[in-house]
Image (cartoon, helix red, strand yellow):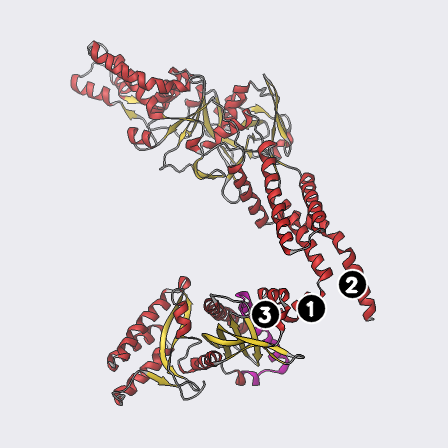
Amino acid sequence: MKNVKKSFWDVTKKYLHYAIIPAGLLFGILFSLTYVGKFFHLKVYDLYSNIKAKPAEWDKIVYVDIDNQSIDAIGRWPWPRSVMGQALEALSIFGADKVIVDIEYIDKSELQLDIETYESVSQYGTSLPGQQLMEKLVMNPDRMLGKSIYEAGNIYLACRGVDSTGKENADDLQSISSSFFYPLKDKKLAGQLVQDKWMELPVYPLYLGAKGVGYTSVDYDFDGVVRRIALFHTLGTNYLMPQLAMSALMDELGADKSNIVIIPGQHVLLHTTNGDIKIPIDDKGNILINWSNPFKDSFTHLPIVQFINYYNNQQYLNKYANIFDKETLAKISNQNVEIISNLVKVKGKIVIIGNASTSQTDIGSLPIDPYSPLVLVYGNVLNTIYQKAFLFDVPLWENLLLMLLFSLLILVFDRRIKSAIQEVLLTLGALVLLVFTYLAAISWMGMVFNYAMTFMGIAITYIGYVAAKFIRFDKEKNFIKSAFMHYLSPEVVKQVIDNPNLLNLGGERREITAYFSDIQGFTSISEGMTPDVLVGFLNEYLTEMTDIILSVNGTVDKYEGDAIVAFFGAPLIQKDHAIRACNAVVDMQKRLIELRAKWKSENKPEIIVRMGINTGDAVVGNMGSMQRMDYTMMGDTVNLASRLEGANKFYGTCSMISETTFAVVKEEFLARELDTLKVIGKDQPIRVYELMDRMADASAGNIETVSLFKSAMELYKTQKWKDAYNSFAECYKKYSDPPSAVYMDRCQEFIKNPPPASWNGVYVLKSKG
């Protein structure tokens, strides 16, 4: 039977590598569907968005920013709509071709008092009837801005799509739908694209003079980053509604609005005066934006306050021109010339007005900038489409093809690998080639591979092939691994595999941290359990604790009933072995809290485990005979760790560490000095500490306990017994602190029977615990 099994195993190993590539491809696909896979893909995409070749910037795009300079000059945002009207009129004067206003004017403005007229009437009086006077005194900002929009004739305003059907602007929406929105010929798109049931228009009369309207909502990926945007929503089942930038671009390109072809997952086809344009989109109708640069580093930017100031200056000059002398007029004109030289940059341009101040809320995360004004989206949408610098997600078969080609390439070369160094070089070479393949694809062809799918698929194929070689040619190493993995961490097993001579008999002196643990009252606990229940319970406990020890690369020496003996710092050299040991103790005590809750619900004992650790020199190595050996530790360091575990009993504590351990870990762990002890078997006293938690995780209660206990200990050491008693009593009363109760008893004893003058604070343990 043994020969049959061996023959089957040999056949399996021989053909195992043929299944590696399909397994790698399948794993890559599955990984790409997970949250981690999607997150990985998006972050790699963001990286390439920053390092790839940037698209050329369309010089027709100009940003007129509502920036900090403008807000400082005009006043707190939002401004009166009449101010925006002034800016729009100035833009018209300077010949802006199209103006996109990324501000929602959905609600009506409050009427305002014309201060100048009011002061004039107050000073000189008026003969106007009441009604006419009111019309003179009261300004309607909406009408003023509407007039500016109407006269400009090239303004594109923001609207807002909503899920619920409204009635407030029903007549307005019905009357302008055919003007601003496009007929939806393919009714199936209403269920494939984002569908808005209703549209909140700019307030009357703003929309009457608008050239177009469009929605401003952006699409966030699940990690909160804007990478793509829908070019069209459906309005009900009858109309296509453009994104605000798209509304202006349709006019700029002379696109046929009645014949827009949208195939989700493929493209948007526009018939323009200069030919057809195919815009790649995903299955939701989103375009993947090809970003140029962060906000201030891309396109032309002008502060809006310059246009407002120009408008007001001109109004002022026109009104008071007959008052000034020629010299003053010339001076003012020269100042205007300096301003005009900057403002003429908008002539013939597509102007985008948006809030770019640091105090605004319309801020979002983009692949090229984690904190950017979202108005940057509009310019990049325009630029991506006009420059035809499209990016698109490659289909599944192209991802699979890339994985297959790289997998085959790696396998062909890996067959010639003779050493570990060559294996590393092949890995690095393949990784570099893959990185540059991704970069070339997105930079020059606009191809966006599924980075999670392809990278993980190739990686798993390579790892699988290496693993197959490992299985095929390394029987001895597999045996070692299976024999030692139960009490050594994976990294230690790896060292033993790489150097089997470690299994030779012998030892070496090395600094380590020794660990001992024991279940409190286990004898009485075991007497109340049947053998099978006891074994199952004990195995569960030992498995949980062992996993934590191995997780920090500790080594399990042995199990002695319910006791665990382990050490850190051997056979692997670990400079931070004391920190690893303390991390293991903290994690084990926290895990025990969770397990006690579980065991309580199962009517099992809620065990308390005492642990002791000590750092120092010990002899470590394989001890035994050639037929049977153990990798273990010996020496005083080991014995003291065992004594500290037992000493917990006298203080009501669970985790005790020596002064040598504390000296190493005191910056990272919260611990308090418990006592200066002379343990059985040791002539020299040693200071011991209770390990309470990681410093970063310590609770306020633990921190205060340490502080109160420390103050009490200082009084105790100076033999101020009554004061010390009161301090310990305060700590005990507040936190039911067992060590404080121990010291309260000692203080009472010393009050009755003071220690001799030679008392040095050392406490001698009478038993091992």
Q: Residue at x 39, y 19 (%)?
A: 91
**Location of mark 3 (residue):** 488
Q: Nearer the viewer, residue 375 or 159?
A: 375
**Location of mark 2 (residue):** 9
Q: Nearer the viewer, residue 76 or 325?
A: 325
Compared to residue 208, the image places residue 362 above or below, namely: below
Q: Is residue 63 magenta?
A: no
Q: Main secondary structure of the magenta part?
A: helix
| Pointer 1 local density, CA inside 10 Å: few below 14, some 14–19, many at least 20 | few
Q: Quadrant of residue 97?
A: top left
User: At numbered mark 2, what does the secondary structure look like: helix, strand or loop?
Assistant: helix
| Pointer 2 local density, CA inside 10 Å: few below 14, some 14–19, many at least 20 | few
Looking at the picture, which amino acid does disc 1 mark?
A: Phe
Looking at the picture, which amino acid does disc 2 mark?
A: Trp
Q: Earlier in the sequence, mark 3 or mark 1?
A: 1
Q: Nearer the viewer, residue 348 or 407?
A: 407
Q: What span is in magenta?
A: 525-554
Q: Residue at x 41, y 89 (%)?
A: 766
Compared to residue 769, the image places residue 133 above or below, namely: above
Please indicate whether residue 358 sits to the left or right of residue 59 in the image: left
Q: Quadrant of residue 643?
A: bottom left
User: At numbered mark 1, what does the secondary structure look like: helix, strand or loop?
Assistant: helix
Compared to residue 518, the image places residue 402 above or below, namely: above
CA separation, marks 2 and 3? 27 Å
